[in-house]
Amino acid sequence: MSDAPAAAPDPVEVGRRLFAASCEFFAGAATIESLPPFGLPEVAFAGRSNVGKSSLVNALTGRGTVARTSSKPGHTRQLNFFDLGHRLVLVDLPGYGFAKVGKSVKEAWQDLATAYLRGRPTLQRVCLLIDSRHGVKPNDEETMGNLDKAAIVYQLVLTKCDQIRPSAIPGMIEATRKVAAKHVGAHPEVFATSAEKGTGIPELRAALASLV
């Protein structure tokens, strides 16, 4: 009988199994008072309006209708909470940037997101999405600075990589890594993804599964 230790589970397979579990919407918060109580570990998805947050959540879970998507910026107007197999909560945050809404509405969204990010002990990581067609913009860096101050660990995730030349992806990853290196809260690993083609989705699932 062999005494050899069992092989460590494949991280990609662990991630696949986690994200293959049921994923159900259970709360939407438009005000600080309506945030759900603390419970399971949480991963939040943040980024500029129309960067592809909802599409990425759908791609991770392998379901096209978990999070509602729209080509219109500012479609997500509350914090949406999804229970993933009773092991992890995915949180889709309102986008920041060029959403065509009034100033008071934008400020209310920002206040709500800030209150959530700073006061959520169950929050394990923020995935900060960056449109690979444009790279890190000033409002992305502003958000990174705010996350640094709040001592929140976040990970930069490039989206829509199917919409740039494949040869341009390594350079975009490296440029994004250089920006991340300037921020104390940024995880050094950058993921390049495409919700449309599935690029980078297994690797991101594996990284998030390691937080559970």
Image (spheres, grey):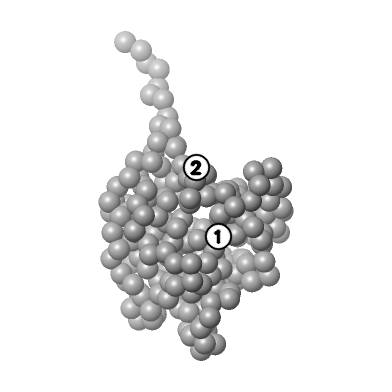
State which quarter of the image contains the N terminus.
top left
The local crowd at label 2, few if under 14, some if 14 to 19, many if 20 or more residues have their Cα within 10 Å, is some
Q: Quadrant of residue 97?
A: bottom right
- Left/right placement of residue 189 relative to residue 114 reads right
- Compare residues 41 and 179 and report the one nearer the observer: 179
Percent across and percent down for residue 205 are 44, 46
In the picture of the structure, the residue carrying the numbered disc 1 is 129
Residue visible at 52% across and 67% down in the picture: 50
Q: Amino acid at mark 2?
A: Glu
Residue 151 makes an appearance in the image: yes
Above or below residue 122? Residue 9 is above
Is residue 145 at all visible to an observer of this figure?
no
Q: Position of residue 10 (x, y in %)?
A: 43, 32
For label 2, the SS is helix
**Residue annotated with mark 2:** 203
Q: Give the distance between the C-alpha atoms of the residues marked 2 and 1, in whole angstroms.
A: 15 Å
Look at label 1 and name its amino acid: Leu
**Image x and y of residue 107, in percent:** 52, 84
Under circle 1, the secondary element is strand
Residue 166 location in percent, x, y?
64, 43
Residue at 37% x, 16% y is 3
